[in-house]
Amino acid sequence: MDYISIADAMKQGKGIVALRGWCYRERKSAARAFVVVRDDTNIIQCVIEKASADPETWVAAEKICIESSLTVQGEIVPDARAPTGFELRVRRLEIIHLAERFPITKDQSTEFLLDVRHLWIRSRELTAVWKVKSQVLAAARDFFSQKKYYEVTPPIITGSSCEGGSTLFSIKYFEEKAFLSQSAQLYLEAMIYSLKRVYALTPSFRAEPSKTNRHLTEYWHLEGEEAFMNFEQLLQLEQELVSHICQWVATHCAQELKVLGRNPEELKKITLPFPCITYTEAIELLHKDGIEIPWGKDLRTIEEEALMKHYDKPLLVTRYPKEIKAFYMKDDPSDSRVVLCCDMLAPEGYGEIIGSSERETDVNILINKLKCQGEKIEHYQWYLDLRRYGSVQHSGFGLGIERVVRWICKLESIRDAIPFPRTIKRMTP
Ligand code: 4AD
Ligand code: MG
């Protein structure tokens, strides 16, 4: 008999089916055993009656323990009392591998669960997160393909910093020092001269010294860059991308969102236009709320959270003071104190999900800005060449995949948005 998935068996709803998977829960009495089986699609309650089961099946049912792998065959019937609305009346159960005593039980500490992360990633909640994340990536690729962007493959080992030295990881590169990429942006900027519209999905690395719920040292970064794109078009594009991801996940992940406690209707409401304010307006709004923050200071988590109390959609905050932003951002022609940049903040206090800007196109302004930030010009000669040979207006953005997944899945910590999180204190398993 061919094996089918639990989801397909439930769709079929009747008749004899064969399934394979793992023992999720088990409960036994003298007369019958209940084994909840899980596979990648769902869980289903299986019942084995001692009186009617063949002897080997009953022996297997008595022996089986959590996370053992198994096959079952039997009749599937609707049953309102069963956890997912169906029950399998088992005719035959075979153990593929009898598991050792599974180390994960109820109420274990976060640290222990991170130690056994390679086993904990099988949990129902985390499985739902991986599925949502896969659909977030599918949605993003679908979006960029509709917009006629090329996916490109920038390097991870680099000799120049994109986002400033304080969060750079350095590595020994033969006799030299190299860095792990913080952002593909500088390379994407180079590639727009051949492909006009490009995007990349890469790991980015940040030596973040703080332990927070929104920082990883290795995360997945989705970045886009487009030639001839102005600031207004950039803002439009990033709103469309985030809305597309939310609509897509709401339609493709109803079952997973339910497991995670996120109502799909909330995601469906993420439509254009998103609210948009300047940094200066954000500071004024914070002052009205009685929060003291001088103009010129970067927004911290507490200020972002206070701001987001006013909004239920992602918020665009534009035109930050240039001193607190990266060297490549273009000065605002109408106010030279600020740059043409935009951070997108997620609702419900999940924080910044996108960093973006129009890029400076003038080679001398760039050289000056690099010098002011204490960077060595020789490391950037190749990048400066991009402004020497056919420089054009262009803009781009970077979206943190795990930040978006954390928000969509309502996760307490960003660690649960990635299977094997790397943080200040952890690089195993
Ligand atoms: O705001 P950031 O630093 O911007 C850049 O790297 C630009 N070069 C992107 C570009 O324009 N191409 O990072 C972009 C996004 C942030 O908004 C956040 O979502 C995510 O990357 N991010 C992190 N995610 C997880 N852990 C960290 N330590 C992160 N740092 C940034
Ligand atoms: Mg940022």
Image (cartoon, rainbow, N blue to C red):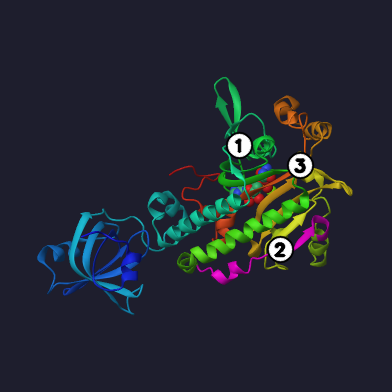
Mark 3 burial class by Cα count in 10 Å: few <14, some 14-19, many 20+: many
Residue lying at the far top of the rendered structure? 175
**Quadrant in which the N terminus appears:** bottom left
Residue wearing tag 3:
359
- The answer to whether 58 appears left or right of 100 in the picture is left
The x and y percentages for residue 52 are 12, 73
Question: Which of marks 3 and 1 precedes in the sequence?
Answer: 1
Question: Which of marks 1 and 2 precedes in the sequence?
Answer: 1
Residue 55 sits above or below residue 187 on the image? below
Do callouts 3 and 2 mark residues in contact (Cβ within 8 Å)?
Answer: no
Mark 2 burial class by Cα count in 10 Å: few <14, some 14-19, many 20+: some
Task: Give the residue type that dot 2 points to.
Answer: Phe
Looking at the image, which is closer to me, 224 or 410? 224
Do callouts 1 and 3 mark residues in contact (Cβ within 8 Å)?
Answer: no
Looking at the image, which is closer to me, 357 or 409? 357
Element carrying mark 2 = loop
- Is 266 colored magenta in this rendering? yes
The answer to whether residue 402 of the structure is visible from this angle is no
Residue wearing tag 1:
181
| Mark 3 vs mark 2, CA separation in Å | 23 Å
Residue wearing tag 2:
274
- The answer to whether 84 appears left or right of 201 in the picture is left
Q: Which residues are magenta?
A: 261-281
The x and y percentages for residue 193 are 69, 35
Task: Give the residue type that dot 1 points to.
Answer: Ser
Q: Nearer the viewer, mark 2 or mark 1?
A: 2
- In the rendered structure, find residue 374 and report the number of the disc placed on it: none
Element carrying mark 3 = loop
